[in-house]
Image (tube, grey):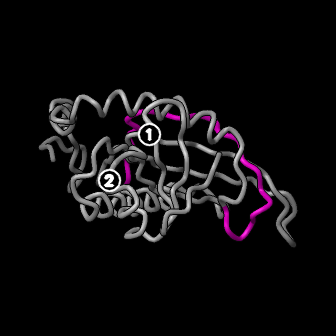
């Protein structure tokens, strides 16, 4: 990362380094990112079950941002797409509470290595959770990172099985669905 520093120990990425970190992407990445961003606005327009301890909370998508930049302590990171969710629900002994959710979508037009995608999403999720925690974003805030791959990718099912939880698949046109381990596709 870059040499610019604002304070002792804080490393910043220069604008040129931010560019250079992404310019070698396959040209299909940008097109897939835009298509998934448009579909995510609808897919996450209303979502329930995002907070496991509060499955009845229904959230609305406030925004879907491309190349979202987050600053966490001494580091910065990007998410291909960031879905911001907001909801409210009853919590025993506390009454109505505000809920917030952040879903970082990591767009992968081609899976070269399932392990590489898993590692990238794991680090992204860790950074995202630190960002939520360090930002004092509230007790009822959840963050997760999810890979989005083409449904036709021959390694899509292998990725879902290795991750052990649902991933998102894009059909190359107008569908953005969940793919569960062991081949169970969840419809919108």
Q: Is residue 165 above or below residue 23?
A: below
| In the rendered image, the vertical position of residue 35 relative to residue 85, given as above or below | above
Q: Considering the numbered disc 1 on the image, is that residue within a helix, a strand or a loop? A: strand
Comparing 71 with 177, the one in front is: 177
Taking the magenta stretch, the answer to whether it contains residue 163 is no
Residue 48, percent across and down?
72, 54
Disc on the earlier residue, 2 or 1: 1
Nearer mark to the viewer, of 2 and 1: 2
In space, the residues marked 2 and 1 are separated at their CA atoms by 23 Å
Task: Name the residue rendered at 74%, 53% in the picture.
Answer: 98
Q: Quadrant of residue 118?
A: bottom left
Whether 6 is drawn above or below 42: the answer is: below
Badge number at residue 161: none
Viewer-side residue, 72 vs 80: 80
The image shows residue 134 at horizontal and vertical percentages of: 47, 60
Q: Residue at x 67, y 62 (%)?
A: 51
Secondary structure state at the residue bearing disc 2: loop
Q: Quadrant of the C terminus?
A: top right
Q: Which residues are magenta?
A: 51-72
- For the stretch drawn in magenta, the main secondary structure is strand
Task: Find residue 151 and report its horizontal and vertical position in percent.
Answer: 43, 46
Q: Residue at x 52, y 50 (%)?
A: 103
Q: How crowded is the residue under tag 1: few (<14 C-alpha within 10 Å), some, or many (20+)?
A: many
Confirm whether the magenta stretch covers residue 70: yes
Left-right relation of 143 to 47: left
Q: Which residue is mark 2?
A: 154
| Residue 160 coordinates in the image, percent (x, y) | 42, 63
Q: In the visual, does 60 lie left or right of 24?
A: right
Which disc number belongs to residue 81?
A: 1
Question: Between residues 19 and 112, which one lies in front from this camera angle?
Answer: 112
169 lies above or below 171: below
Q: Residues within 10 Å of mark 2 (few under 14, many from 20)?
A: few
């Amino acid at each position: 990362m870059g040499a610019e520093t604002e304070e002792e120990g804080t490393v910043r990425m220069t604008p040129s380094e931010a560019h250079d970190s992404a310019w070698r992407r396959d040209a299909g990445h940008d097109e897939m990112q835009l298509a998934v961003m448009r579909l995510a606005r609808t897919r996450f327009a209303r979502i329930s079950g995002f907070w496991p301890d509060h499955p009845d909370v229904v959230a609305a998508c406030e925004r879907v941002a491309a190349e979202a930049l987050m600053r966490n302590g001494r580091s910065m990171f990007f998410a291909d797409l960031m879905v911001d969710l907001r909801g409210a629900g009853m919590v025993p002994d506390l009454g109505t509470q505000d809920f917030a959710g952040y879903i970082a979508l990591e767009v992968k037009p081609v899976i070269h290595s399932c392990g590489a995608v898993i590692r990238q999403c794991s680090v992204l999720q860790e950074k995202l959770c630190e960002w939520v925690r360090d930002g004092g974003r509230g007790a009822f805030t959840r963050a997760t990172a999810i890979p989005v791959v083409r449904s036709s990718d021959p390694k899509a099912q292998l990725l879902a099985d290795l991750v052990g939880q649902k991933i998102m698949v894009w059909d190359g046109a107008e569908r953005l669905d969940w793919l569960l381990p062991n081949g169970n596709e969840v419809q919108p």
